[in-house]
Image (cartoon, rainbow, N blue to C red):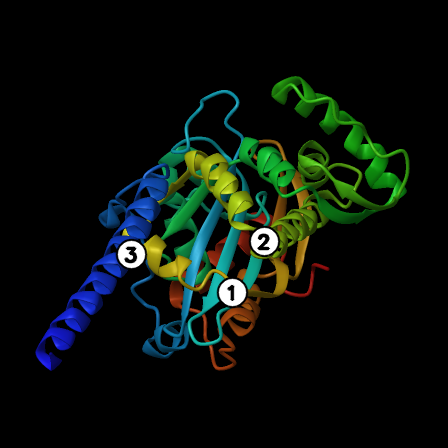
Amino acid sequence: MKKKKTKKRRRVILLIAEIILILLLTLLLFAVVKLSKIQKTKLDMDQVAINEDLSSETMDAMSDYRTVALFGLDNRTNNSLSKGRSDVIMLANINNKTHEVQLVSIYRDTYLDTGSGVFEKCNAAYAKGGPEQALSMLNTNLDLAITDYVTVDFSAIVECVDLLGGVEMTITDDEASLMLGYIQELNRLTGNTASCPSSGGTYTLNGVQATAFARIRYGGGDDYKRTERQRAVLSAMIAKAQKSDLKTLNALINTLFSDIQTSFSNADLLALATNIFNYKLSETNGFPYEKTAHRYDKVGDVVIPCGLSSNVTALHQFLYTDMAYTPSDTVKNNSEMITSKTGYREGDGF
């Protein structure tokens, strides 16, 4: 009798274990199917430059973090996530221990070496050589060692904000006025009929309105203020997504994933996803810190770091709490080249 009860108990335990295994495999299959919507690319690492003169101390300071490059493209003309100027360039810096995430906007018009000693607006790097050249531009000018990126099409932002039920933003009278043209353009492109806020105030912006708000540039603080708006919208989206139900998250995944290209593998993405509700956005800012603006006939309006070495030092102190950081010779040489070409140096900016 006792043996029969023991066998029965074992069968029950085995059945429960099988059910749990099936559920786990089903969840894993669901995740993989969803992740398959994302465009994966294998970077040619021979084409991704990292400064060879980076000190071991700098590498050690960065080892506790994972820094990922985020690019935002406007692909209305080429319909590709591998080409085009990157209107948005951000660094997402993840603290591996605390899961805090810092965002730094790299002003797209920043005057940097985009490759082979050609100094121009840094957003040209993605257009010239795709993600490999864009990562190389960031690594060599900023003493970074980034090997992963995520690129997203602006059109996805409109749909995602709508799926989240909008995001709350406080806007000024000037921003409300400047949003009108962007809203009209986005309405034509997306088939929406979004209205424009009549004045400043706090609003729950829909997808078109939030995207228009994030795209304001001229007359509204130029690219410096523009990147603040982009980070504000992104932060609000992340915060709201973390509080969303599974139905909303599933809709977001279906909408956004097809408009993403990344170097992350499915395994990488699954590993990152396990902490998705633990990530906490902390401080955000824009680079360069001390800067000025100037217009040149060949390259147009640019943002000039004053100077590059001191700005990169401040960046490493912010991202990695590396108070002992010393710029590499490569960064120092680029800094001297920018001063030579523009005449602007440390102390000349704001």
Decide if residue 227 is on the left or right side of residue 248.
Answer: right
Residue 111, position in %: x, y?
A: 55, 47
Q: Amino acid at mark 2?
A: Ile
The answer to whether 145 appears left or right of 183 in the picture is left
Placement of 58 over or under 241, stated as above or below = below
Relative horizontal placement of residue 318, taking residue 30 as reference (left or right): right
Residue 265: % across, % down: 29, 49
Residue drawn 26% across and 57% down?
19
In the rendered view, tell whether residue 76 sits above or below residue 45. Answer: above
Report the mark closest to the observer, 1 or 3: 3
Residue 40: image quadrant is top left
- Give neighbour class at mark 1: few <14, some 14-19, many 20+ (Cα, 10 Å): some
The numbered disc on residue 24 is 3
Quarter where residue 183 is shown: top right
Q: Earlier in the sequence, mark 2 or mark 1?
A: 2
Quarter occupied by the C terminus:
bottom right
Mark 3: which secondary structure? Answer: helix
Q: Mark 1 highlights which residue?
A: 279
Nearer-N-terminus badge (1/3): 3
Q: Amino acid at mark 3?
A: Leu
Q: Residue at x 56, y 31 (%)?
A: 155
Q: Give the residue pinned by disc 2.
A: 238
Q: Tell me whether circle 2 and circle 1 mark residues in contact (CB < 8 Å).
A: yes
Residue 107 drawn at (x, y percent): 59, 48
Among the two numbered marks 2 and 3 on one chain, the one whose residue lies closer to the N terminus:
3
